[in-house]
Image (cartoon, grey):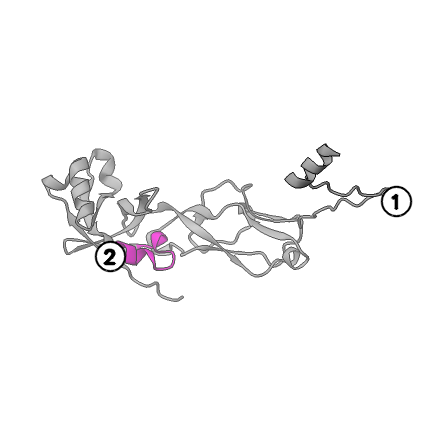
Amino acid sequence: MEEKEKMTINLHRRTQREVGKGGARRLRKSGWIPAVLYSKESKSGKVELLKLEAREFEKLLHVRHASHHLLSLSVEGTERRGIIKDIQRNPIKNEVRHVDFYEVKADQKISLSVPVVIQGEAKGVKEGGILEIVTSELEIECLPEAIPEAIVVDVTNLEIGDALHVREILVPQGVSVAESPDEVVVVITPPEVVEEMVPSEGEVAEPKVIGKGKAEKEEAEES
C-alpha cells in the first residue's frame, strides 16, 4: 500500500488577550486564525484554545482531500495527531474564520466524513443517461491509520434507471460506513427530452404579429 503523505500543521496557544470576540478579531487582522483542539477528554471541559497562520492553513487546504487526512498537529513543538472536524468561513469573502481540530489516539476509532470519488464510465451514460451524485460525502468510522482519502465508487455497470446504495459499496478493510444502508449514493437518470410543438396536419401556424411603429400607427389612424 502506498504510504500516505504526512501533513503537519503548526499550532500555537492563544494568550488571554487573544480570547473572545475582540481577541479573535485582532488575530484575523494580523494573519492568524483562531482554533480549538478537542479530544476524548473534552467532555470534562478540556478544550485547548489555539491559533494558526492563515497563509499556512490555506496552503494545506490546496492538498487533495487534506480536510479528511490524519494530520500531525505540532502544538508549540509537541507533536500530536488529529483531524479537522470543522472549518468556519466568512460567507461573503469565503475566508477561514475558525477551525476545530480533534485529537485522536492510535487505538481510538473515530468518525469523520470522507468524499465520494466516481470511478469508470457508466453504461447508462454512454447511452445518453445522466450520472447524478446524490451523496457526495459519507460518514465513516475507523482507526486513525485506516482513514481513506476517499470512498471510491465504481459505476461502470450502472444502466439508465439504476441506483447504487450504501450497502452495495466496497469500502477498505477496517472501515465501516455509518450511513443508512438504503441511502442512494449515485443514480443514472434518463436523458432529458425536449418536445417541440409541431402543427397538426392542415393547421397553419399564425404569423407572429409585431407591433406597428409609431409612424405606421399614426398613418393608420388618419386613414
Q: Residues within 10 Å of mark 1 (few under 14, many from 20)?
A: few
Q: Amino acid at mark 2?
A: Glu
The picture places residue 180, in percent across and down from the top left corner, at 51, 40
The residue lying at 53 percent from left, 51 percent from top is 169
**Helix, strand or loop at disc 2?**
helix
| Residue matched to label 1 | 201
The residue lying at 40 percent from left, 56 percent from top is 149
Predominant secondary structure in magenta?
helix
Q: For this rendering, which residue is in front, 189 or 96?
A: 96
Which residue ends up furthest to the left in the rendered image?
Answer: 16
Quarter containing the C terminus:
top right
Q: Is residue 22 found left or right of 159 in the rendered image? A: left
The residue lying at 15 percent from left, 40 percent from top is 23
Q: Amino acid at mark 1?
A: Glu
What are the residue bounds of the magenta stretch? Answer: 56-70
Q: For this rendering, which residue is in front, 209 or 50?
A: 209
**Helix, strand or loop at disc 1?**
loop
Q: Residues within 10 Å of mark 2 (few under 14, many from 20)?
A: few
Residue 143: say if magenta: no
Comparing labels 2 and 1, the label whose residue is closer to the camera: 1
Q: CA distance from mark 2 to mark 1?
A: 70 Å
Q: For this rendering, which residue is in front, 170 or 215?
A: 215
The picture places residue 3, in percent across and down from the top left corner, at 35, 65
Which residue ends up furthest to the bottom in the rendered image?
Answer: 2
| Residue matched to label 2 | 56
